[in-house]
Image (cartoon, rainbow, N blue to C red):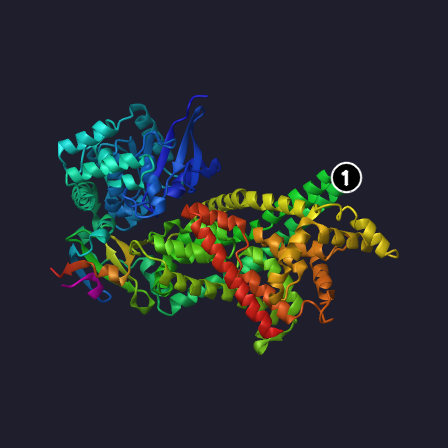
Amino acid sequence: MRTVADLGIGEHGFISGFTDEKLSLKLLEMGCLPGTEVILTHHAPFGDPIAIKVSGYTLSMRREEAATILINNI
Amino acid sequence: MAKIPKIALIGNPNAGKSSLFNTLTGLRQKTGNFPGVTMDKLTGIWQLGPKNEIEVLDLPGIYSIYPKSIDEELVINILGNPAHPDYPDMVIVVADASNLKRNLLLFSQVRDLGIPTVLALNMIDVAENEGYVINSIKLARELSVEVAEVNAKKGIGVNGLKLAVQKTLKNRFASNDGLPLPVSDELIDEIQAAFGEVDPYRSLLWLMEHDRMKMFTKDQCADLDRIMVKHDFEPKKYKSAETVKRYEFLTEVVDRCVINLNRQWDAVPVKTWTDRLDKLFLHPVGGYLFFLAILFVMFQAVFTWATYPMDAIDAGVAFLNDWLKGILPESTFRGLLTDGLIAGIGGVLIFIPQIAFLFFFISMLEETGYMSRVMFIMDKLMRRFGLNGKSVVPLLSSVACAVPAIMSTRSIGSRKDRLITILVTPLMSCSARLPIYTVLIALVVPEKNTLFGLFNLQGFVLFILYMLGFFMALFSAYIMKLILKAKEKSYFIMELPTYKAPRFKHVSYTILNNVKVFVFEAGKVIVAISIILWVLASYGPGNSMKDASDRIKIQNPNLSGVELSNKIAGEKLENSYAGHFGKFIEPAIRPLGYDWKIGIALITSFAAREVFVGTMSTIYSLGGEIDNENATIKNRMRAEINPQTGKPMYDLALGFSLLIFYAFAMQCMSTLATTYRETKSWKYPLIQFGYMTALAYISAFLVYQALS
């Protein structure tokens, strides 16, 4: 299963689900809804945290958190 | 006087809530405390008309009413509990129009609680620049609330908001769609039967969040738990499903009310300023360099520019004291007023310039949106040490004062990260340590240039002391990370807002409010301690103090004038309660190279380290006749001879031993009190006091033994 953590800079995907129930509420509230497009825009130095564009704004999260967001490419 | 209506301002972080608050209330703001919690409460008066005032309450920025950190809990405690003293008559939800859908999530939750609500659409200009045109009339109809377009930064649209608020206050109309997702009627009935007839969404909030709400007793919480089990209700599932459902509805609303011009033109998205700036600020190398440069300017301001107003305050207080001593007759009251009270207040006021400068920078960094980038690039580094990207702000602030720094940890969501940040923050060298560093460095470090002639050696030692505090904070955090158990996982899901030009008005309000909090919160303690100190240093057991002046006159028949009164003051201090304490602890501090005189300074500066210099000048019995006070303390201390070795007392070993001790020791009652308030337990201030004192003692011991 691909997750947001697998994206390279400039790559995108569509959210298909979450693997962590507790984090998922926070992510949903922040606009990471199933079916929404995410684009990875930045890595912090050392590759972690990352920043993604989602629902029209930039959201940062750690790599391990990004790994709980499942994506597909359709 | 009739009760004036109360409005609460609520909105996402970065939606412009604070600037709207400032626009509405101007300078008629006051900070206070919420009952039961230590959070600063910011309220202000909004003048609607000549005889029409409204109290506006600024609530912390949140994304959803379901709290994830302590500062967010406050919102449901107020909005969820109609009996709360701060429960508002209505709410203004401030929404960032350029990110409408996400901002409306919170709006829809608040409205469903059954509180009359007005929607203030902010940053419409930003939305239009990005190609979104919002039909706010249609939006008002779709959401069945009053909608007002405002430009909080420029103060445009306040009249429209006024009308919307007046209308809503008059109608008391709370539009309510009922529950976002249906649950069984019996569940709602059962909650309402036990806790009262309220809007169904509010009853569900009680059911799901009762652990975080202070309105419920233990028994009531148990009742709610029982209801939850009986109906097989899973809050996490419900909240997630609710959020998805709300977004589905809001997507439809936004599609109907917002026209996206970009889509029609099918244009390539333009590179925004934010994208360009992020290329620099988030650059693996450039990003750090830029942050370092900002830090450098900040330190320059706090340590160089702030000295001018600080000297002025110092001189002003000294002048007032001398003047009062001149016009008042010699009495206990005069001593208490001048050496106790006014000296204590002066000790508080002197820190205002540094705190003001520091908050100027911090609020500028926050205003522009740069602070979240700092957290972003620092997170990985800080995480290794058990901290969090968000710990950067408290660590930075504590260079001025640990009290506001500890209060600023509330936004850290994970309890473990927050606790560690609180515990290590006081290791950062605060402004109260600066005068001690200055005096001691001048005493034992020669003034010459070194290291390729670039640095002044004294300045270099000062810099090293600050670095030492920082690295010790990281090191201690690392140890605590291994010891403390985490109940929950820390997370770092955070918006990176677009860059904005700072609003200087807003920055100045932030400075003003923070200075107020410092003066009244920390100030109270410092003044109280100063008075106690004065008493301890002015009185002693038995008659030994009273007889001091006679004894000195007999022992030194040739002395007169200033020299005599200095000797008498010294003798008095030695026989005061403070002096006895100093002698009492002398055996314990001898391995560090200290004598009973320094012991007095240590004891007095336990409460607040800034009194060190003052105590030193009393101990080395200074009169008020000399112009340059600091230079004189130095001279007196330099002249002090160690009775055992016959060499100068303040040599390199003692100097550095003291410097290290003051760098690490927990000598600040206000900080301990703040830690207690923020952790709601005596355990953590005790741990903080214990480990820092041990650290200080051991380090000072090693330094002294190595150097002497």
The residue under the point 49% across, 50% down is B672
Compared to residue B354, the image places residue B206 above or below, namely: above
Residue B691 in the image, given as x and y percentages of width and height: 48, 59
Residue B706 in the image, given as x and y percentages of width and height: 58, 74
Residue identified by numbered label 1:
B327
Q: Is any atom of residue B568 visible in this view? A: yes
Residue B156 in the image, given as x and y percentages of width and height: 38, 38
Q: Relative to residue B701, is residue B254 drawn left or right?
A: left
Q: Is any atom of residue B369 visible in this view? A: no
Compared to residue B388, the image places residue B514 above or below, namely: above
- Residue sitting at the far bottom: B452
Which of the chains bears the disc numbered 1?
Answer: B
* The one of B190 and B166 positioned closer to us in this rendering: B190
* The one of B474 and B707 positioned closer to us in this rendering: B707
* The one of B21 and B384 positioned closer to us in this rendering: B384
Secondary structure found at label 1: helix
- Residue sitting at the far right: B558
The residue under the point 22% across, 39% down is B225
Residue bounds of the magenta highlight: A1-6
At label 1, counting other C-alpha atoms closer than 10 Å, the crowd grade (few under 14, some 14-19, many 20 or more) is few
